[in-house]
Amino acid sequence: APQGPRANVAQASSVQLGTPQTWRAALRSPNWQRRILAIEALARLGDLDGMLAATRDRHPVVRRSACEALGPYHGRDKARATVVLASLVHDSDRGVREAAALALGWMRVRSARAIQALLEASHDGFARVRTQAAISLGELRGTSLDRAIVARLSELVRESNVFVRDAATQSLAWTLRDAPSSARQLVLLLRAT
């Protein structure tokens, strides 16, 4: 049988979820596991305000959970969630930065702010953050910033870390498939190396 916060979530899903106000109050619990349970309930209820509040938690595991809950959010005001996630790619905790980069791609809000945040995250000192940034840049292709995306991904395909390199290669393939006009730029970039 599952233990810890996941067991609590399983128990919560078998009963009525309650109101967003109840779960927002639970975000103030001194127990970080209870706060994670609250985030998961708020996500099921589609309560964007509650999930956004959790991104400011003092505990990095709670902030990470909030990012993970925001990724699949497809309700109204996704742009507001994107702004918060874009700021979290600069969080002091690398797990939060990784989750924020993943969530930005998952949300697929193709805004300049999201893409710029991911371009910045692709320079992170932690390889898993760079990997998620590369994947998410591929998800946000199809904008006027494709040239910047292609330029950064073409740098990342030469990265020493195999996971970053593979993620960049896949994202670059998606971007070039959808924007063949960028292929010439890539050939020129690769020739310059």
Image (cartoon, grey):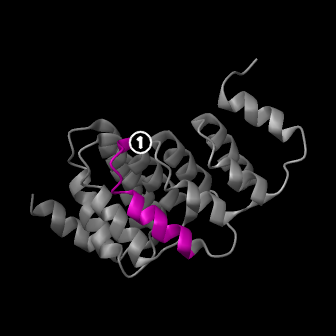
Residue beneath label 1, please?
Answer: 95
Q: Quadrant of the N terminus?
A: top right
**Residue 90 is covered by the magenta coloring:** yes
| Tag 1: amino acid | Gly
Q: Position of residue 41 (x, y in %)?
A: 74, 49
Q: Position of residue 133 (x, y in %)?
A: 38, 54
Q: Quadrant of the C terminus?
A: bottom left
* Residue sitting farthest toward the left: 192
What residue appears at the point 53 percent right and 44 percent down from the top-left corner? 62
Q: Secondary structure at mark 1?
A: helix
Q: Main secondary structure of the magenta part?
A: helix
Q: Position of residue 107 (x, y in %)?
A: 57, 63
Q: Quadrant of residue 13?
A: top right
Q: Is residue 64 left or right of residue 38?
A: left
What residue appears at the point 84 percent right and 48 percent down from the top-left corner? 17
What residue appears at the point 62 percent right and 35 percent down from the top-left corner? 33
User: 68 or 119, which lies in front?
Assistant: 68
Question: What is the span of residues highlighted in magenta in the rendered image?
Answer: 79-94
Q: Position of residue 160 (x, y in %)?
A: 20, 39
On screen, 32 above or below 135? above
